[in-house]
């Protein structure tokens, strides 16, 4: 049985201790990766999202990414995820009524292993999304290490190499949608092949491609970084691949130990810790292929929302105004057709 690392996402009193004012409160930001849910005692709905989006930085739009929230259990297994899209469309309207920024895109879930039959699920998502549905994420993060969790969508080993998976991805491309990929750094070679096999679809790799620091990789930082950089360099050659820069608050994958501090880390510390990796990624892919993301409320296990965006602003300070525009909003607007 897989050992799961427990994380606390709702230590709100602790998170409040790290609050910072925005370094650049007027610069427009699209947050292209956040979740919504109300389960297991954890709540992150329109009201909580509104508080984060409007507190410090100039967040103009967001994109919701699937997280198995509010599935419609009365429907068939294949169509249950449509309930999540319906739920987020409702939350988007509630957020607008609160006076907040728009949830301008929804990335839902559809099982690509349905092959050609996935078209029915996509059509239902489009109807439920009220014009917001943009694509799907089928998380394929997999490991045989008992200390490294398998994605919530329960993928099998090398699922992205399966004929049915490519068949489903091809249908996704034909319908004009995008594909978000969540996997670990030692699986990037599978995504390289997938991008070559289906060059028509925009593929967005989540969370920096997950250079892990847990399990068997906990004491192998140099080995991880070399493999991660080698594989991302290959992936960057595919013109249809984009990269989300974020997930950096996930102690359960990156083992920063920030969650054990008396107060949350400052944006100075976060920027110092991640700057080399993030600038390498930006320079390898180019700003037009990268976008900063919050991954909230998951990253709230270690970082306040304000600290996260301040850290990104510190790291991006070396780039031109137009390059920063791409990183903070332009790439996301292009990829997700906002």
Image: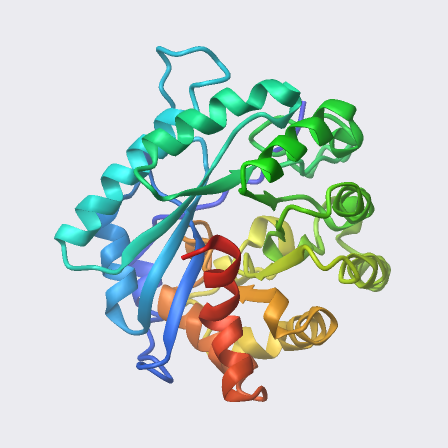
Q: Is residue 259 above or below residue 119?
A: below
Tell me, yes or no, if residue 10 can be seen here.
yes
Q: Is residue 133 left or right of residue 206?
A: left
Image side of residue 276 versus residue 18, left or right: right
Foreground pick, 110 / 145? 110
Of residues 8 and 118, which is closer to you in this image?
A: 118
- Residue 26 percent coordinates (x, y): 31, 82
Q: Position of residue 240 (x, y in %)?
A: 68, 55
Judge left or right: residue 82 versus residue 271: left
Q: Is residue 310 above or below residue 4?
A: below
* Res 219 quadrant in image: bottom right
Q: Residue at x 71, y 56 (%)?
A: 211
Quadrant position of the N terminus in the picture: top right
* Residue at position x 53%, y 77% in the image: 269
Q: Residue at x 55, y 77 (%)?
A: 271
The colouring scheme, among rainbow, by chain, secondary structure or one colour, is rainbow
Whether residue 207 sits left or right of residue 214 in the image: it is left
Residue 20 screen position, x and y as percent = 34, 77
């Amino acid at each position: 049985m897989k050992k799961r690392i427990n994380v606390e996402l709702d230590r709100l009193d602790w998170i409040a201790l790290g609050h910072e004012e925005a370094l650049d409160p007027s610069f427009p930001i699209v947050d292209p990766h956040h979740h919504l849910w109300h389960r297991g005692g954890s709540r992150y709905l329109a009201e909580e999202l509104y508080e984060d989006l409007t507190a410090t930085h100039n967040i103009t739009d967001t994109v919701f990414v699937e997280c198995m929230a509010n599935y419609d259990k009365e429907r068939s297994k294949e169509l249950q995820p449509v309930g999540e899209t319906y739920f987020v469309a409702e939350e988007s309207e509630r957020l607008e009524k609160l006076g907040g920024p728009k949830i301008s895109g929804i990335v839902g879930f559809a099982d690509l292993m349905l092959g050609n039959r996935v078209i029915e699920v996509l059509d239902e998502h489009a109807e439920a999304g009220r014009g917001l549905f943009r694509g799907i994420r089928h998380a394929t993060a997999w490991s045989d290490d008992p200390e490294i969790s398998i994605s919530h969508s329960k993928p099998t080993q090398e699922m992205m190499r399966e004929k049915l998976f490519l068949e489903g991805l091809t249908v996704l491309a034909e319908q004009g949608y995008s594909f978000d990929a969540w996997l670990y750094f030692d699986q990037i070679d599978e995504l390289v092949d997938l991008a070559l096999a289906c060059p028509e679809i925009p593929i967005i790799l989540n969370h920096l491609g997950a250079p892990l620091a847990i399990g068997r990789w906990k004491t192998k930082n140099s080995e991880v970084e070399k493999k991660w950089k080698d594989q991302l360099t290959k992936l960057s050659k595919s013109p249809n691949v984009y990269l989300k820069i974020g997930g950096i608050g996930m102690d359960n994958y990156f083992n920063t130990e920030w969650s054990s501090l008396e107060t949350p880390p400052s944006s100075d510390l976060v920027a110092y810790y991640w700057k080399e990796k993030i600038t390498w990624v930006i320079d390898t892919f180019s700003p037009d292929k990268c976008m900063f993301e919050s991954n909230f409320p998951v990253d709230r296990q270690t970082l306040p929302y304000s600290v996260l965006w301040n850290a990104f602003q510190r790291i991006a300070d070396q780039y031109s105004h137009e390059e920063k525009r791409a990183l903070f909003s332009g790439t996301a607007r292009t990829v997700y057709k906002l």
